[in-house]
Amino acid sequence: MGILRRQVYVWQFPIRLFHWVNAVAITVLFLTGMYIGYPIFVSPGEAVQNFFMGNVRYWHGVFAYAFTTNMLFRLYWYWAGNEYSKFRFWKKDFWQDVVATFKYYTFLAPEHTVKVGHNALAQLMYLIFIWISSLFMIFTGFAMRGGSNPNGILQTLFGWVVVNFRGEYQVRNLHHLVAWGYAIFLLSHLYMVIRQDLLDDDGTISSMVNGYKFMICKDALEEETQERLLKK
Amino acid sequence: MSESESYYQLARRRGVTRRDFLKFCALTGAMLGLDATEFPKIVQALESKPRLPVIYLNLQECTCCTESLLRSAHPLISDLIFNMISLDYMEPLQAAAGKQAEEVRLKTMKEYPGAYLLIVEGSATLGDGGVYCTIGGKSSTELLKEVADGAAAVIAYGSCATNACVQGAYPNPTQAVPIRKVVKNKPVIDVPGCPPIAEVITGTIVHYLTYGKIPELTNLGRPKAFYQHRVHDNCVRRAFFDAGQFVETFDDAGAKQGWCLYKIGCKGPTTYNACAITEWNDGVSYPIKSGHPCIGCSENNYFDNTPFYTRLASIPNNAIGKDADTIGAGILGLTGIAVAAHAGMTAVVKNHEKNRKESNHDKNRN
Amino acid sequence: MTRIVIDPITRIEGHLRIEAVVEGNRIIDAVSAGTVFRGIEKIVENRDPRDVWAFVQRICGVCTHIHALASIRAVEDALDIRIPKNANYIRNIMTATQFVQDHVIHFYHLHGFDWIDVVSALKADPVQTSALARSISNWPNSSDGYFRDVQTKVKTLVESGQLGIFANAYWGHPAYRLPPEANLMGVAHYIEALSWQKEVAKIHTIFGGKNPHPNYLVGGMASTLNMDDNSVINMERLNLVKTKIDEAQVFVDQVLIPDIFAIASFYKQDLYGGGGGNYLAYGGIPIGDIREPESFLFPSGVVLDRDLSKVYDIDLKDPKQIQEFVSHSWYRYDDPKAGLHPWQGKTEASYDGPRPPYTNVDEKKGYSWIKAPRWQGHAMEVGPLARFVIAYARGNKEIKGLVDDALQRLDLPVTALFSTLGRTLARALESKYLVNQLAGFYSDLVANIKAGDSQTFNGEKWEPEKWPAQAQGVGFAEAPRGALGHWVKINNGKVSDYQAVVPTTWNASPRDDSGQKGPYESSLLDTPIVNEDQPLEVLRTIHSFDPCLACATHLLTPTGEEILKVRIL
Ligand code: HEM
Ligand code: HEM
Ligand code: SF4
Ligand code: SF4
Ligand SMILES: [Mg+2]
Ligand code: NI
């Protein structure tokens, strides 16, 4: 009996679009943000002829809005998207899968339950590193943006953040600290994606481009199911 | 009564209508929780008295705020205390001492319930039943509550009063707290800074006198007129910031040309104060203009946003913390090691599996 | 016998309580208690030594700047950092400015009403006041019209029934000795000095960015100099400094000095308040460098028992010389009777006083938040008088000239210095001594810039990597109120121990383990009290020290004495 594979359409276009906008926005935000933290280039000549730091801050601002909009869109897609775009952390099997996958990754269990979409542990990572962190970055970021107009819209919406972190300086300091979270995420994310692709040979890497993954079919029944699914 | 103006006349002259004046009196009454029949008393008190009675308390502080007040150029402090307000109690300036001083304070509290203005310099202290600051044998925190109870409004003047300043820094041995934490039943206006600029506090007081109401406040309870903008928003060195021209160390070539102090720790970007606009001591200069970065003296927690001379202060503070990059890059490094280890482990396990499978296969064959 | 309590002592910085036992119109015992504690020495532990100046500067906003200066000197001493010449000139200009400004505020606004009776000024004849003013000074504000205006202002205030800061004081007390005209002149100068002090403070603003609490920097000053740039300190900025120096000179020469002589001439029979008679000065204002004591404007030393024939040398690093005791303070040491040198010092609060609200402190137990510093076991007075006594005994020509001339004008012997009035006189003469130096400091600065040196900071040892793992240092200065020292220990780039022994700690110190009284306490002994309800004389003596309680913070009866009644004043 040979190993059978079927192509499964997992990532709908909006998910892929979200993913790459998100990836680009975070990369730009991380780089511009860190530059704001450590402006290392010295502009030559007179101050009036230069606006380098100003531009970096400008682009941080532009991508901050792009990033936020993209996140809001993804929120909508949890509701509107296909099965694989959903995330049901209130369900029991989600947490069972977290445990199972954790065992697999810590070599306590030899195999993992094959998932077409992402596994629960990966989803948990997204929850922590993408959702909670981003919410933090968005709230702290907008609280800082709103600062110079104390009774304006941004400040009215996000001003409480400053009060809760004992002043804007610590807001900014924590914004900087949490930025590191994205670097940590990216490193682990890439590792996991590549590892998955290599070990299971399921086309994980290309899936975020074309949407398809390869599903390993263990028996004929499952094969049938897959075929039915694909026809739909 | 002499020919001097009453507080009511002064208010009228400054454009407050009688209706507004009555409303102001009613409001003060309402804040006090007086019933409506008491209002006429307040009205009468203010109508017949020349100047607004003010009680000024010095609690746990260093008196820099008092000193700053003395530096006011417009109005001159002498003009303020002799022509505009009646400064009935203020330890550093008043002639009476001891019992006689306390008598004056009690008299004002009794004669002008709900009408006098209370200005507080210094923090309240909650440690060990208030023994860390006593006045006349009384805990100063109790004194504060007593005087605030009958005030129309309270101005928390200076960073000690608004954020407990240096004594509130880690580990805060005396449990120093801002005035707001103790005075809950009165409108509190925060005028932060260590000290605040003289014209900012006198401006706030005269605003209250002139318009008969507390000035518009920011969401943090500070007068918008002085604390709306960051020092950075209007800094003289801002052009250098935007251009990307930064002082690297004190007195370097950039410093000699007035470049931006951001990289040597300037807190201007997160500090709300009037320094860059009003400037200090009658508009002469302000710290950044003279060459030293802003230390953020009007912001909560500023003595724990240290060390001062670096872009990134330690979290949660300099005595027991580390900066964001040491923490962040540290965790990233650990993650890198974990990934490498995990990859190695995976290779070993897979290799092992493969060997097993192969040997099984071999066995099956044989 | 009556025990009187004065709390709060007003017209000082901070919170001070005096309890005095009066018998037969004289004080026979006194207790001085500082009633506020903030714990700054504890808060700076584990901090970056380069930051600490800003923390400890907030010990006091009246003495503003001097704690910052002592702190950076302590760190510079520990790490052996030398500062550029310009930085020293700027520090000197700021120090002298602070002395003059603070002494004037003290004389008129804090101490003034101990000598000047505001209500009596209402009876003055403006024409005669004008004549008096002109007879003693060329100060232009001296017309009869001018004094009439001032008088009308005061009258309006009094008649309004709202006396504000003048309410309920000891006006009309028999210990006031000035004629109405001198009182009116005093009130006028009170108001003028109020306006003037804010002008001279601008010198701090130019170099330190603000006042109170100008900025300092370990390794120099953050006052960038460049005569050819318009965004840092250039000629326009320096000209403002020069203008303010010139104005200060005129004010001191034409207002402060004539006033002090006029007032002193009416009070020269009141020579109480001398106290223990031990004087200490660390010396300060280095024309060269802080490591060159020969270049100090104020010599250092100790004089014991008013004996001007012998001056002892001081070593701030000698563990046996300067020690702090806590047996009557609200702090805990392992050995409660020990005296600890500041490098071994500890600041652990341990309150065993009465629970507030209280009516009396108990001098048998702890009774103050101030420690009791001692020099070789002696309680020492510090301040302008101490500096002048030591300079006089050391034969400093300029200071000796100022003192001898003043005594001659007042027709008083040298021993008259050891009094409440002597302290006040010394402070005024010191203003004169320093204002004369300001113009010189300024020219030194300008000349050095002209010679091509505009450096204000030495960054060689700025980075902690260049520091030894362990270091300790002491920074000292003469503050307006007296000898100030900060002791620091640095361990792996952070402060491990920090102790400040400040002028008011010396002056307002409580008793030590042997029962020896602090200078406030001993100076009150034997002071005449005309009226127990209005202890004006106590205020006068205490104010003559220029107390600064945030800087430091307590009067008590000897054990076993019978107290007949307690009066809270
Ligand atoms: C992935 C998301 C983000 C990352 C990694 C990131 C990173 C950073 C970093 C490292 C800094 C420098 C902080 C410092 O050293 O002081 C910064 C500054 C800042 N960020 Fe973000 N940021 C992100 C998202 C956002 C968002 C959503 C906003 C919303 C407006 C925002 C607004 C700001 C602002 C206002 C500043 C201060 C810059 C200035 O005013 O000069 N950031 N960011
Ligand atoms: C800054 C860079 C990146 C960020 C922030 C990021 C973030 C994410 C997020 C949030 C998801 C979950 C998608 C969803 O459920 O909507 C995801 C999934 C995925 N990403 Fe990325 N990504 C980044 C870079 C990349 C790169 C460079 C690749 C490919 C080489 C990649 C491949 C994938 C794949 C294959 C998945 C699906 C994983 C699964 O099967 O669970 N990502 N990524
Ligand atoms: S010096 Fe400070 S406040 Fe001024 S522009 Fe630079 S960072 Fe902003
Ligand atoms: S510049 Fe900053 S530290 Fe300086 S006074 Fe203004 S707010 Fe305070
Ligand atoms: Mg001490
Ligand atoms: Ni002081």
Image (cartoon, rainbow, N blue to C red):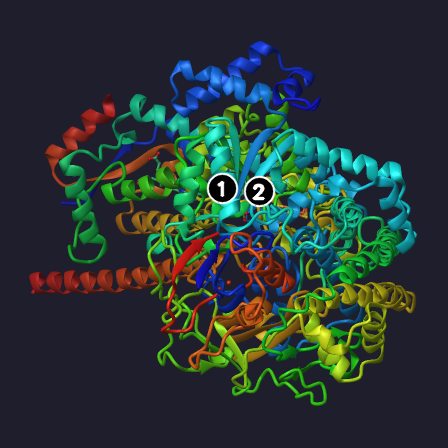
Category of crowding for the residue at label 2, using alpha-carbon neighbours closer than 10 angstroms: few (below 14), some (14–19), many (at least 20): some
Along the viewing direction, whichever of A12 and C481 lies nearer the viewer: C481
Quadrant containing the C terminus of chain B in the rendered view: bottom left
Q: Which disc number belongs to residue C168?
A: 2
Where residue B290 appears, as percent x and y from the top left, is: 74, 52
Identity of the residue drawn at 68% across and 54% down: C176
Pointer 1 residue: B103
Along the viewing direction, whichever of A29 and C69 lies nearer the viewer: C69
Category of crowding for the residue at label 1, using alpha-carbon neighbours closer than 10 angstroms: few (below 14), some (14–19), many (at least 20): some
Where residue C365 appears, as percent x and y from the top left, is: 36, 70
Residue C89 left/right relative to A61: right
Along the viewing direction, whichever of A212 and C375 lies nearer the viewer: C375
Q: Which disc number belongs to residue B193?
A: none
Identity of the residue drawn at 50% across and 75% down: C517
Q: Residue furthest front?
A: C24
Q: Secondary structure at mark 1?
A: helix
Residue B358 left/right relative to B244: left
